Image (spheres, grey):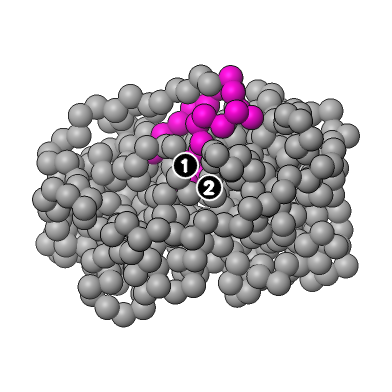
C-alpha cells in the first residue's frame, strides 16, 4: 500500500505528553492530549462536554486580520501553515497558547491563556473587530460510541481504558453472501458506471487499518491529529472508509461494500483509538482536508452540543473551496448534534432496510438519509469485516455517492454537489425533519 504522510517540523517548545507518562503540558498551552483533557474534566466534576479550551472564529474573509489580533494580544501562537500540508495536531503546538487554522478562519486557545490575556468568551465582539465569536470547545465522539451515553461515563471509560481494563469484543458476524450490501443496492450503486476516480475523499475518524488486504496497493494520504499513529485500533474509521471507498470486488464470497472504489483516500485520524476527540482536533482535520482540496469530507462523529460558529465557518470555507462536508446527525433520538447542526454542513440521518428512520437516528436539521442499520463493511484485522449500525454508517454512503457525482461533472463541487445529492435523492413519505430530501442515490 502506498501511503503518503505529511512531514512535520520539530514542535516548538516542550512536547505535550499524555497522562500516562512524562510531565504534563503547561496549563496555558493548547497541546494537551484528549485523554488528559477528559481526565481533567472528570476531576472538575459536573456533566459538561466542555474541554476547558476555547474556539475563536474570525469574521468571514478576515482570517489574517483575526490572527493578527490575537498576536497583538501577545498570545504565543502556532499556525497550521508552519506544517507540511497544514497537517498539524494539537500535540504538535508545543508551548503555544493558540493554534491558528487559516483555511477555516478559526483558532483554538487555552482557557488559562484566554483569561491571562484579558479576553472572555462571554464578551460581545466590537463591531470593527475581526473576531466574530469566542466559544467553548467541546469533546466529540464517534457517532454510536458508548461515550455518547453521558460525559461522566465517557471520562470514566477513558480512565478505565488507560488502566488497561479490556474492552469487550463485538460479536462475530458472518459476511453476507450477496453481490452487494443492502445499502449499496438501495442507493443504486452497483449499476452506476462511476468509480470516484480523480476525486479526493477525506474520512475524519479513528484512522484506518493500513494493512487491510482489501486495500492492498491502494494509495492513501494519511495524517493523525490526536498524537496516536493513524493505524486504527478502534474499527470505526476502517468501517466508514470501507463504505465510502472500499473495493468493487472483495475476495471470495464477500459482498461489495464500498462505493467510490477508485477515489483517492485521505485518512485523517481526529479521534483516538477509544473513539474520543476534541472540537479543535476535528477542526484541524477539516483545515487539512480543505487545504488539500478534498472534494468530499466525511465525518461520522459529533456530540449533543449547540451549533458552533467554528464548525459553521469551516463548512463555509469548504463550500467556498469547492469541498463538501458531510456529517452524521447523531444516534441519540434527539435534535441533530454538532457539527452536523451547522447550516454549512450536510447532515445525514439513518434508515433501516425497509427505508424507515432508524430508531436511534437524530432528527430536526436533516439534509438527506442513507442506510445505517446493520451495515457490513471493512474492519481491522484479524476480523476484516463487521456489521454495525448508526448514522456513522449512513454518512459514508452519502460521501461515497457524492464522490461518484463529483466524478460525473467538474461543475459538481461544493454547494452544487450538495444540491445535486438532494435533487437526485429518492423521495420518502416521511417528514423532512427525519429523512431530509430522501434516500441518497448514486448517479
**Residue 95 drawn at (x, y percent):** 15, 45
Q: In this view, does 307 lie to the left or right of 323?
A: left
Q: In this view, does 178 lie above or below 30?
A: above
Q: Residue at x 23, y 75 (%)?
A: 44
Q: Residue at x 39, y 62 (%)?
A: 139
230 or 279: nearer the eye? 230
The residue identified by callout 2 is 235
Give the residues drawn in magenta, as a range. 203-224
Which image quadrant: the C terminus? top right
157 or 39: nearer the eye? 157
Secondary element at image label 2: loop
107 or 148: nearer the eye? 148
Spatial separation of the CA atoms under disc 1 and disc 2: 6 Å
Q: Is residue 100 left or right of residue 224?
A: left
Q: Which residue lies furthest to the bottom in this view?
A: 46
- Within 10 Å of disc 1 (Cα), the crowding (few <14, some 14-19, many 20+) is many
Please check the rendered image and state whether residue 6 is part of the magenta-colored stretch, yes or no. Answer: no
**Residue 58 drawn at (x, y percent):** 37, 52
Secondary element at image label 1: loop
State the count of labels: 2
Amino acid at each position: 500500500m502506498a501511503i503518503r504522510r505529511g512531514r512535520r517540523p520539530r514542535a516548538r517548545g516542550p512536547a505535550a505528553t499524555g497522562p500516562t507518562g512524562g510531565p504534563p503540558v503547561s496549563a496555558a498551552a493548547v497541546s494537551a492530549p484528549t485523554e488528559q483533557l477528559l481526565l481533567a474534566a472528570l476531576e472538575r466534576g459536573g456533566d459538561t462536554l466542555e474541554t476547558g479550551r476555547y474556539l475563536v472564529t474570525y469574521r468571514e474573509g478576515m482570517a489574517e486580520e483575526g490572527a493578527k489580533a490575537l498576536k497583538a494580544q501577545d498570545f504565543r501562537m502556532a499556525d497550521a501553515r508552519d506544517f507540511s500540508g497544514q497537517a498539524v495536531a494539537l500535540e504538535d503546538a508545543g508551548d503555544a497558547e493558540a493554534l491558528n487554522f487559516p483555511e477555516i478562519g478559526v483558532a483554538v486557545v487555552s482557557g488559562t491563556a484566554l483569561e491571562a490575556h484579558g479576553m472572555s468568551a462571554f464578551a460581545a465582539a466590537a463591531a470593527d473587530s475581526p473576531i466574530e465569536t469566542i466559544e467553548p470547545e467541546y469533546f466529540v465522539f464517534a457517532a454510536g460510541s458508548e461515550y455518547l451515553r453521558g460525559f461522566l461515563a465517557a471520562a470514566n471509560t477513558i480512565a478505565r481504558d488507560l488502566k488497561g481494563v479490556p474492552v469487550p469484543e463485538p460479536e462475530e458476524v458472518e459476511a453476507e453472501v450477496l453481490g452487494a450490501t443492502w445499502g449499496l443496492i438501495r442507493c443504486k450503486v452497483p449499476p452506476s458506471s462511476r468509480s470516484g476516480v480523480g476525486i479526493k475523499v477525506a474520512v475524519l475518524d479513528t484512522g484506518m487499518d493500513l494493512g487491510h488486504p482489501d486495500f492492498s496497493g491502494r494509495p492513501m494520504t494519511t495524517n493523525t491529529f490526536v498524537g496516536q499513529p493513524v493505524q486504527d485500533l478502534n474499527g470505526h474509521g476502517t468501517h466508514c472508509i470501507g463504505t465510502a471507498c472500499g473495493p468493487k470486488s472483495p475476495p471470495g464470497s464477500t459482498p461489495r461494500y464500498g462505493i467510490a472504489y477508485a477515489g483517492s483516500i485521505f485518512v485523517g485520524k481526529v479521534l483516538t483509538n477509544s473513539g474520543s476527540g476534541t472540537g479543535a482536533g476535528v477542526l484541524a482535520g477539516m483545515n487539512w482536508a480543505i487545504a488539500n482540496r478534498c472534494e468530499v469530507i466525511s465525518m461520522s462523529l459529533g456530540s449533543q452540543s449547540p451549533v458552533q460558529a467554528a464548525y459553521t465557518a469551516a463548512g463555509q470555507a469548504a463550500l467556498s473551496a469547492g469541498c463538501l462536508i458531510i456529517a452524521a446527525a447523531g444516534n441519540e433520538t434527539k435534535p441533530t448534534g454538532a457539527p452536523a447542526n451547522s447550516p454549512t454542513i450536510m447532515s445525514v440521518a439513518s434508515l433501516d432496510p425497509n427505508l424507515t428512520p432508524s430508531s436511534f437516528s437524530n432528527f430536526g436539521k436533516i439534509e438527506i438519509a442513507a442506510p445505517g442499520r446493520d451495515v457490513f463493511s471493512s474492519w481491522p484485522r484479524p476480523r476484516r469485516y463487521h456489521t454495525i449500525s448508526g448514522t456513522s454508517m449512513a454518512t459514508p454512503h452519502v460521501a461515497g455517492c457524492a464522490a461518484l457525482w463529483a466524478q460525473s461533472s467538474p461543475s459538481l463541487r461544493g454547494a452544487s454537489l450538495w444540491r445535486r445529492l438532494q435533487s437526485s435523492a429518492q423521495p420518502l413519505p416521511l417528514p423532512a425533519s427525519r429523512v431530509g430530501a430522501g434516500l441518497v442515490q448514486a448517479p
